[in-house]
Amino acid sequence: MLKECIEVFENQLAEAGEGEDLILDTYIPADGTYLIIDKNGQRQCTVEIKKDKKTKEIDRSSQNFPVICFYDYQSQLISMNKPMDGKKIIHSNNYLSFFVKKDSIVSGKLTDEVIDNYYETLKNPMQKKYKNSKEACKIYELYEKQEGKPDAERIEKIKAWIKANVYTLEDVDLGRKDYLKIFFEAEKDLYEKENRRYLLPNIYNSNDYNIEIEDVVYGLPDNNLGMNAKKPFLSIKTRKYPAPYLMNGEDVLIQKKFFDYLMNLVSAGKYHIYVDTENKKIEGYKNGSAPSCIEAGYYLRISKGKNEAEIVNQDNLSGYRRKLDIPFAFENMMNCRHERHPAYCDAYCNYYDRLDIGRLINEVLFSKWLETNYSTGAADINITDDNLKQNILLYRDTIFDWVYKGIDHGFAAVINKVSLNMAKSSVLKGLNDRALWQLNFRWSMQKYLEKGGNCDMAEIISSIRESVKRKVLSNTSSLLENDEEYYYAVGQLAAYLFSLSKAKDKNQSLLNPFLNAKTDVEIKKRLLQIYKKYNYTISDSSKRVKNLLVMIEGYVPESPVNQEMVICGYADDNLVYISKKEDK
């Protein structure tokens, strides 16, 4: 998978023209103050960079921004475990740049001694940095033979400028908790050269795994992989070389650039990466966005790790289409007025896009908590409603796969479960209008996923409501005709009996025994208990209540408890309280 993704990335690099434009065009430097010092030691420009926490965007309007991105990218450490400053106070990788956190200056951590040691290391990396690593020495020695030694005279001049100026820079707010980054003007080739001087001995996970074959060094790449003494289980003990795979310097540099590009995307809030292997294209998307179609490729879910972008999830894509072949019709099958929630009525319409349905699922079933928690760790989901949290954890992966990857497998079963769970949860909270909205969505999805098949709940519900209504309002007792009518009537009677409670805060969980009952005997027993509790408030002349009681007592269902019909009857307008106008 990774190899194919990198091949697509290489193709994009080639199309970009100058190789790294693809990376630099999306590059987001860290927050801080950036200075460029010209060849005469004068400050050429000062640029303040601060990323907007909400939009993940930065101001790119400065004419010096492109060159700052280039200098900064070429001067980055691979990680803080591989610094050129042994004290880890200076965070740049070559003598042309100087990165330090402002509070290191204010606190006094940055001293002349630290600066001297940093530039001494850059002047003689072989002795100061790599002398204890035979493999790193070998890599650096090969590089130095080809590219030459560092420019000692230039290093001394830059060191002298830093020591003379870094503590007393004018117009630099050292009180901010961000970086001070100083770049010394130089040709791009020199920056690239000094970056390679740092990268090549440090780019592998550990030089202990390096091998040399025909004067070419192969090693274990560092991206998303950490082999060390604390992780012996990652070693392949049956091989002479225990590393999972090895790469030469050229390939590992390309892989680093790929992960650098992913880091740019995740820094911009684009966590969803689509690799189109057919059209040789990689694109990143923020939450709630996706490509229109991909015939073949990969989906990568990335996150921002401590030092790099981390691939936390991946999947194959085959024939992904955002646009639906058949539009989804969200129907008001219960014919609800939603007078207190007009937005509910606005949602009843046709939907043509998987993302739109994803947003609908997020709002209708999960009260807008799903979209922001698709990949949040269970311990980090800040939701007090345990039932909502549990349903997110149980079903989010399948919903995400349908919306963002076009994987239909298991989606219908999940929607069937979660829609009933959340409708049940709503009615137990006394949110009857929302429960009916969720049932409408449930039945609309069932109809859609059956491709317009036998599931015509609008007709079924209308028939049940009218039949039970006619019998409840009749002057003579009637019999229920089927199990659906029975469970709808149970919900109606339970809602009426609970309404008689004079408690200030009515406990909707009293409905639970009806929803979770295993037998009809339990339901009738529970109804009788509640009826005896509140029958002193029921008028002897209440024909509607008597009709409901007679119908329920006189019917024995054959099927298990139909929870959705109990919820439907409970949340629907109660027939006992229906006005005489509606009676007609």
Image (cartoon, rainbow, N blue to C red):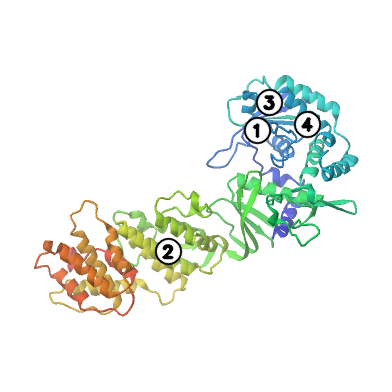
| Residue at which label 4 appears | 95
Q: Amino acid at mark 2?
A: Val
Q: State which quarter of the image contains the N terminus.
A: bottom right
- Please report whichever mark, 2 or 3, sits nearer to the chain's N-terminal start: 3
- Depicted 248 relative to depicted 151: above or below: below
What distance separates the C-alpha of mark 4 from that of mark 3? 16 Å
Q: Residue furthest left?
A: 540
Which element carries disc 1, helix, strand or loop?
A: loop
Viewer-nearest of discs 4 and 3: 3
What distance separates the C-alpha of mark 1 from that of mark 3? 29 Å
- x and y percent of residue 275 in the render? 66, 58
Q: Is 98 left or right of 559, judged from the image as shown?
A: right
Q: Residues within 10 Å of mark 2 (few under 14, many from 20)?
A: some
Q: Residue at x 74, y 31 (%)?
A: 97
Q: Nearer the viewer, residue 429 or 230?
A: 230
Residue 42 in view (yes/no): no
What distance separates the C-alpha of mark 4 from that of mark 1? 25 Å
Q: Which mark is residue 62?
A: 1
Are discs 2 and 3 less than 8 Å apart at CB? Answer: no
